[in-house]
Structure formats: C-alpha cells, structure tokens
Image (cartoon, rainbow, N blue to C red):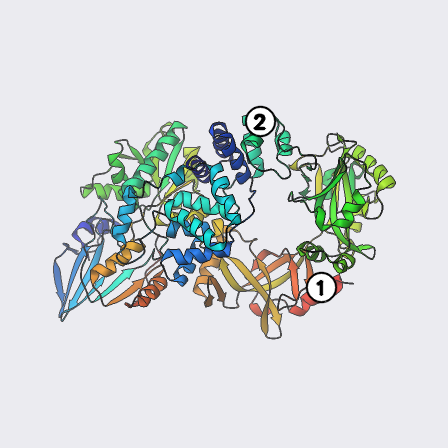
Amino acid sequence: MTSTDGAALAARRLPPGAVVNALAYGDSFDLGATKVSLHPAGHILGSSQVRIENQGEVWVVSGDYKRDPDPTCAPFEALTCDVFISEATFALPAYRWSSASGVAAEIHAWWQENRAHGVASVLFAYALGKAQRVLAELMSLTAETVYLHGAVASVTDTYRSQGIKMLPTLPVADAPAATYSGALIIAPPSAAGSAWMRRFGDCSTGFCSGWMRVRGDRRRRGYDRGFVLSDHADWPSLLRTFSDSGARRILLTHGHGDTMSRYLREQGIDAAVMHTEYGAEE
Amino acid sequence: MRRFAALFESLDTTNATSAKVEAMAAYFRSAPAADAAWAVFVLMGRRVKRSVGQSLLHAWLIEEAGLPAWLVEETYGSVGDLAETIALLVAADARGTHSRDGDAGFSRVRDGQASGLDWAADLSLSRWFTERILPLADMDPAAKRVQVTSWWRELKYRECFLVTKLLTGALRVGVSRSLVTRALSMVFEQPRVQIERSLMGEWLPSAEFWQALARNEGSLHVSHPYPFFLASSLEGPVEALGARENYLAEWKWDGIRGQIVRRRGECSLWSRGEEIITARFPEITAAASSLPDGTVIDGEVVAWKDERVLPFAHLQQRIARVKLSAKILKDIPARFIAYDLLESGGEDLRPQPLRHRRGELAALLGRRGGQIIQLSAELPQDSWQALGQQRQQSRVRGVEGIMLKSWESHYGTGRQRGAWWKWKIDPFVFDGVLLYAAPGNGWRSNLYTDYTFGVWSGDALVSVAKAYSGLNADEIQELDRWIRAHTREKFGTVRSVEAHHVFELAYEGIARSTRHKSGVALRFPRILRWRKDKAAGEADQLADLQRVLAEQQV
C-alpha cells in the first residue's frame, strides 16, 4: 500500500510481481469500523502520513516528514488529531535548517570554485529523495548536466517518469574520464572512499545531510564540505507540527525521541517514546 | 572579523594541506598587518590570558538559551564543543526558534532583518582582541556577562562561534604550527627555520610585530630559546640504524624538556611548551647564573633525590604549586640534565655536528656545571646487543628508555626523522573493563569516545584509568552503538555501561594517589586492543596494579 505518487517508486524497489496498492492522497478506505487515509508527508516523492479514524478518535502516524518546501514532492499536510506519532530524528535544538535554495546556492558556488581549480565536485547524498531534491533545487542556478552514480541514476529516472523537473543528468558510466574535471557528480554516501571514486582523480567531496549541522560530525566523516540539507523536520518544525496537530498525546520514534518527550512533558504535553522496529536512517 | 572568518572557513573546509597553506598565505598577503599578526598568533594555537572561564560561558549559555538546563546539556553533549553549542543555540540567527511558536521569529531572522548589527562582524580581528576581548580581563563577572552575551546576540553563527572560540583559547582548525610557518615562509620569502626562530618565546601580536617579522627580526628577544629538535620513535630493529659507533646513546629522562638561556647577565628556563618556568625552579636558575654569557643549553628538568630521578608525578606536584615552600624545595629537589649546547659565546652552534656540540658541552660543564646542571651520561656499551641489555634496566633506573642521536647530526627544528631516535621501553599493560563513556570533542563529538576503565577489587570494579585513544574508526563506531544500547545510567553526558567489554591498556608509569578511589594513578594510559576474547571476569585485579606500584617504588 502506498500513495499514488509513490507507486512507481514502490514498484521499482519491490521484487517483480509484488502487488502495489496505490491510494490517492486524501482518499480513504475502511478496515472494519476504522477509516484509513494517506496524506502527504513532504519527506520524499510519495511519502505519506497515515491517518486512522475510529469512532471519532483520530490517530496520525507521521512517518518521516519535513515542513520545508521541496519541488520534488507534495508539501506536508497538517492534520489535526488526538494522538500524533511523530519521528524525532533531529529532535535537538541544535538542528535547524536554513532554506534549501540557500543551500543549493552554496553547493553551486562550491562546484564553480572547484571547477576554477580544475577538480571534480563529488556530492554525497542519499540516492532516494535527497539527490533528486538537489537536482531540482539547482535548476534555478544552472542548466548544466550533472553526472550520477548508478544507484542515484535509477531513482532519478523514476522521479523523472513521474514528471519531476530536474537538471539534465548522465550516468557516470557513460561519460569519458576526461569530462569529470570541473563536473558535479552525485553519489550515495556508501561510495565515499570506494574504488569507484578513483576515476575522478583529484576531487573535492561534500555531503548533504542534516547531520552536517554539527561540525564534529562533518570532520569525523572526512568530507571537505558539509551542506546542511535534510528531508526531516528540524527542532522548530517538530514543535510547530505538534502545535498544529492539536494532539493531546504525542508519541515519538527515532533519534532523539527521549529528549523531545521529556521536553514536551515539561511543557505540560502528554508525550512518550514509542519503541519501533524501524531501521535507523540518515 | 569577516575576513578572518572567511579564512577559517576555507581552512575548515578542506583536508588538503597545500590548500590550507595557500589560504593562509593569501590572507597574510591581503590582511592589515595587525590582523595578520593576530591571525598567526591564533592559528599557531597561542592564546591570550583567559578572562572568561569555560564554566562561566557554560552558565551564561544556559541562561541565554531559553531552554531547560538539561536540554542545553544534552545538546552540548551531542555537539561536543561549547563555542559551537553557543553559536547553534544563541547566535543572532538562532534566537527565538526554540519555542513552540518560535517559527515566525526564525523566518524573520532568516530573511536577514538582523542586519544593522553588522558592525560587530565588520570589526577587524585585531580590534576584536584589543578593544573587546583583552579589556574583559579588567571587568567584574557581571560586566563580562553583559559584554559577552551581547556579542552572542549580535553575531551570526559563524562569527559567534569564532569569537567564543577566541575567548576560550584554542582555535582548532587542523592547522599545525609548521603549516603556519610554511605559509609565512612563502609570503616573506624567508627560510622556515628563520620564521620558526622569530616566532619562539613570548610575543604580542601587533602591526609592529608583523613588520619586524617581515624584516626578519620577529621576536628575537634577548631571552628567547631556539626551536626544539625532537626525536622520532624507533619502530624497526635498532640494527637498521647502522654502526653503533655512529650514535650517541643516553638515557631518555622522564621530565620536562627545557632550555637554559643565559644571555646579557640574565637567566631564563624555558619549557618545550615555550613557557618560562624560571621561577618554578630557583635552584636551576641559581646554578645557571654561573654559566658564561651567550650560552643556551638543551636538556631535561627532572626531580632528583638521593642520587636518583624521582617519578614524573613528583615533578608535577612541583609545577602545580603556585608558591614554592621551603618544604617542597627540600622534598622534591630539581636538576637539569644537559643534552646539548645550542649557543656558546653568543654563537649559534646548531649547524655544527653533535660530536662538536657535545664536546663543547662537556668541557663547559666540567668547568662550570656543578651538581644541579649535570651532563647527560653517555652510555658506553659498544654493541647494539649490549646496549639493548642496558635498556632493560630503564625501569629500575626510572627512565623511559634510550635516546640515540647521530654524532653527525646538526640541531634541527621540530620532528625531522632520521637523526634522533627514541628507543623506548615497552609500556606496562593491564586488562580493564569499560565502565563509563562520555562524548568526545572535535571530530569525536556526538560519539562516545572518552572511556573510563576499571579493574576488580574483590567482586566490585573500581575505575583506574581514562583513555581516549587507541581504537580505529570502525571500532569507535561499533563501541558507540554498543554503549548507547547498553547504558545503565546517565549522569549528565556521562553514561555508565554494563560491565562487559575488556580492553588491553598500556601505561607508562604508576603512582600512589589520594585523589582516585582506587588509590593509584596511571601515567598516559591508552588502549592497545579490544579484547573481545575476554569476559569481564577475566580483567585484571587492583592488586595486580598495586604490585607494579610496589615494585616501582623499590
């Protein structure tokens, strides 16, 4: 089960022959006496919050979400509910995002500076979502072709098939070695330090992630540059979302859930950590 | 500050040393002289006298953040750097964003309406120091608080971070002293040794200093020492060094490396950290006053009693005292063991071979040395094998091993491999159980990398050592995950963990301690390896360490 927006991505990631049930944002179906609907979460293309209503009581499970605008997906829809189950990946007051267009300008300036020195710019970004967001945000600054690692290229093709506008791209494999000096290449973080990187020779590396907000995190990972760009809600956005929801109870998953729940309880809000079997992401 | 902030950013955003040197050189060429001098000062890791302590800044941060104290602590623990935490929580572009209805405030500041305050960022680096940071020293705490917190509010993230860093001292941006001197050497077209020498000792940054540096005068003050020449650790077999007779062998003393500078009727004693320690060791200074003018001796300050060297811990007690009582001078007498003669009759002997310098040194001390300043004895064993046997005695003699110096070596600058070698004895080892972990600083922030280890005392574990180094990046990550999943209790940012993992630790010495519950203090403990093959019950006993202590004190 996925949103209509996410159906193509889901089909691509699941084994062939898997049945994907798509539901348009806002449409609902019934499970006995319970009404279930999906609503945009603003995290990546097709990401959904799940709204569950039973006998007038409404619960919302946010999944991963963000409040900042993103040209590659539908914006987060603020829902009112009784119980809100929220992610808390970045629930520390140190984590605050500035505008994505500003970050795109930083990435562009870094790319141009590297080009002036004749070196390639290798930008590490999650293959699903972040890479496409960067490609879309850069459109206001340039029309140049960007080179993609295979893992990024296949997801980008799917995004493009869904009508998402992004910079023109070419798979790294198809480009002659000489083209990389001065080029921008987007690769998943797992490619850092691998033999795959050797083809670029001298290059500057950057990483696009909310974790780059903390200097030590960037230095530890050894990237030249850190670009603070996240597909998750930052501290102010989390608080704003809880407030928007009007929920009487907030349950938190992921990351700094214990910190956020204690903070909310001290503000007189009923909150607790909910343990899940979700994997750790970002 | 803007120009310096841009330099900081370019240094902080590359891992290539050549790019760092270029960025510094470009800054030195374009910055006003006074700013360039201050930048050298700061980049070399020097600091002005601290007028605001870490704990005050910490307290003000909690008051200013508008957040519960525990949440500020938790954020600090995660960020791992106080200045950075301050910049993230209270800088101009961070304020008003933490509360539930704060988002409007955030976008307002984000859109740049915090301007009009740009004077603070526009103030030059040197004026930041001379007009703002240095005058803090004469203010009372309340006035300091008003000043510093107003800067935090006015400056944006980057400048706020930098100013706070400058207040607290070390600005760690992955630049070593030698990289700074490389950049200066490019800018002034002077050899690096010359730059090194000009930057020795105490100097205060100013336009005049910068101009003197450019004219190749620098800080050549009468009392200034020479840059220290350092040895490298010998890792391979000693035979690889070639013929035994090509090397001077002497004990590696465990004290404070220092230089006695005797010029124009004055004596100064300098530590390798380029601090004047003259007043701490009056007996050495008194003895040095009988040396002829124009003499500089390199050597080691040690605590010495009853014809033998005392463990380093004794010397530490002596350094720690603000006032030297007659009792402590009597209980812990100091001596200076002379290694090398760097200047004689006002002439710089460093380009001469060691053979010549040692000869001069022995002759000088034979005439004028006395007991307090004594020549470091030459070890006579004429084969590597015999010398190796002598090395086995290091521990009994209270030394760290043997130094090997090529007789042909001139006295270089810093750590240049190839001429001087440390042939250290193997460290002591023990197996300890991980008890506590705290997040590290710098690149280790956000990771539990500051570990406390314990040994068994009966059926309880007592902590005996803290260690930060020795694991590789993968092990650090693995242990960090384990620590988070096996935390027993949290005390602020420190977590106690289940007694499970055993580590082999090395240390250089052991002393009795009244400060530690275990009753022992270990010198320079570090992790050798993670003993996944051992269960917690197989770790060492406190009695094992006490036995080493007893043996060492014979």
Tally of numbered discs: 2
Relative to B233, does residue A278 appear above or below in the rendering?
below
Identified at 46% across, 64% down, the residue is B492
In-front residue for pair B492/B153: B153
Left or right of A195 on screen, residue A66: left
On the image, numbered disc 2 is attached to which residue? B214
Seen at 74% across and 48% down, the residue is: B301
**The disc label shown at residue A238, or none:** none
Q: Residue furthest right?
A: B367
Q: Position of residue B42 (x, y in %)?
A: 53, 40
Left or right of residue B279: residue A239? left
What residue did someone put label 1 on? Answer: B548
Rendering coords of residue B436 (x, y %): 52, 64
Left or right side of B184 for B152? left
Determine crowd level at label 1: few under 14, some 14-19, many 20+ residues with C-alpha closer than 10 A.
some
**Amino acid type of the residue that numbered disc 1 sits on in the rendered structure:** Val
Q: Position of residue A121 (x, y in %)?
A: 38, 35
Please tell me which residue is depicted at 53% across the width and 47% down the height of the picture: B169
Q: Is residue A66 visible?
A: no
Q: Amino acid at mark 2?
A: Ala
